[in-house]
Image: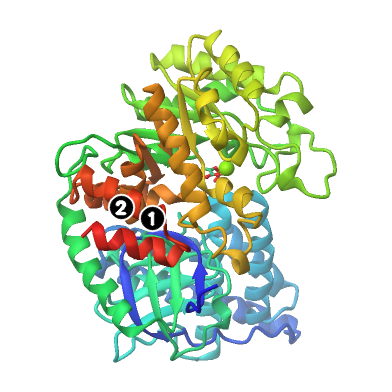
Amino acid sequence: MTNEAPVLHGTPVVPGVGYGPVIRPAPRPQITTTTTTVPDTAREAESARFDAAVEVVADRLKSRAVHASGAAAEVLQANAVLAQDRAWRAAADGKIRSGSDAAAATIGATDQFVTIFEKIGGLQAERVTDLIDIRDRVLAELNGDPEPGIELPDVPSVLLADDLAPADTAGLDPARILGLATSLGGPTSHTAIIARQLGIPCIVATAGLDDVAAGTTVLIDGGTGRIVVDPDHDAAEAAVEQDRTDRARIGAWTGPGATSDGHPVAVLANVQDGSGARAARPTQAEGVGLFRTELCFLDRDTEPTVSEQADIYAEVFDAYQGRKVVLRTLDAGSDKPLRFAEHPQEHNPALGVRGIRVAAAAPGILERQLDAVAAAAERTGTAPWVMAPMIATVAEAAAFADRVRSRNMVPGVMVEVPSAALLADRLLEHVDFLSIGTNDLAQYTMAADRMSPELASLTDAWQPAVLALVARTAAAGVAAGKPVGVCGEAAADPLLACVLAGMGVTSLSCAASAVAAVGARLSAVTMQQCRDAAHAVSSAVDPVEARAAAARILV
Ligand code: PEP
Ligand code: MG
């Protein structure tokens, strides 16, 4: 192994590169649970003290909203409304009426609502940070302490935090905050939304962030979700310079996906539901390359009916009327267990009953899903491409193709298991397209858990063995004259996207936030450069060498 600087990985949210020293927010106020019992006669006044503190906090948020714009203003306004939430205030007031002091009541009511929000899950769970921030502001106000927040640094810095309150994020100055990474938070959290508006490179759900001390120099790449700790200075400066050029190009890119000499390579979006598909529309994505249907049902105890499923799928088809939509059938199991898909207890779920294997374990589930997809297709007048996850044998692909064709839809399979890549030519005798899932393909090729931050360098899609299997699959597509796409994270890496195109991949599907960066990079190079880069990486010994070889050619 080469002696590389440590690299952390998270979910990329806002593309862009930042290089500088780490700062961390000041610790939040200590939350003590000691309660003073307020005598009966003083409870009215204590309740009024709580109300006054809430009003001050809400007014401050409102006035900040007035001075902000776009998403930041909306978020601040929404938080002001949350601070005045009747149910939360009533819960706190009830506690004060029973003798709690205002601070303890604020903490108790917040705990109660955090539990409720977390149970509801999804977007509501992402509001937990907002509520905790409001709690801390109210507590500071009750104690006569200064308002909690982030002190902006004199030296431009990279901000690392567990999570940020929206009010804090909204106050960030892009000139002084070069990048932002959080341990918690999702891609749709308010932190992410505001960072996107401010144009601050941002990564959320980053593993291992706590180990990076303030003052450490880091290179953060919001396009790939990577943070390099103590990077080589010259390499980091070069990355920042490249980012400047890229940003200018990304801003100017209008699509559709093609190399500079006009070879089309479709750039598509990965989505997980109707709202994700609608959110992807303003990007230049030409369609949906991966609709992860299982993500619609993670919170369900029972299988959604065919008509419920059809409604959900139709939303995505509607969002991309007349465009290409590739729907993946349920990839249940392993890291995405579905309660209704009857997984047996397994010692090693990643190698167990998951993906297409669930069709045999839970009879009828695939048939009903395909009926729902066909119904949604008919209702919306679309012709979706439908693919199965985790195909390992030619027989699985053939059986799946029959089921899809019998419903007049276009069948394909994902290439995520090395056996499928090795037999790509034989799979293509049965299906109309392949889509390479580089996340799982890397996991299974390298025998390294894709969720393990410690093994992240092994599950890097630039691993030569992974690239060799991708190249083999793409070549099978070229030989058969059938489309082969990539829909794993590799497609979101603009440099690697060019290499994939050079291998013969016909479409690249990535997170909506990465679409413009991928398209712009592709538009800056010729197909011959892409082919030369694909050839050059084929003899690299490790990901570092592969990246360097590609970068030398794709200038
Ligand atoms: C993949 O494995 O690359 C893929 C796209 O599927 P998922 O990430 O949903 O497993
Ligand atoms: Mg997969």
Q: In this view, does 66 lie to the left or right of 24?
A: left
Residue bearing the label numbered 1: 537
Q: Where 453 sits versus 401, above or below?
A: below
Residue type marked 2: Ala
* Residue 66 falls in image quadrant: bottom left
Q: Are marks 1 and 2 in contact (CB under 8 Å)?
A: yes
Q: In this view, does 78 lie above or below 270?
A: below
Q: Is residue 80 visible?
A: no
Tell me what residue is drawn at x 37 percent, y 82 percent. Answer: 232
Image quarter hosting the N terminus: bottom right
* Horizontal arrangement in the rendering, residue 40 relative to residue 398 (left or right): right
What is the quadrant of the C terminus in the image? Answer: bottom left
Q: On the picture, is 198 further left or further right than 337?
A: left
Q: Where is residue 224 in the image (x, y as percent from the top left)?
A: 40, 60
The residue where tag 2 is placed is 533
User: In the image, residue 308 lies at what x, y percent?
Assistant: 59, 23
Crowding at dot 1, Cα within 10 Å, few <14 / some 14-19 / many 20+, comes out as many
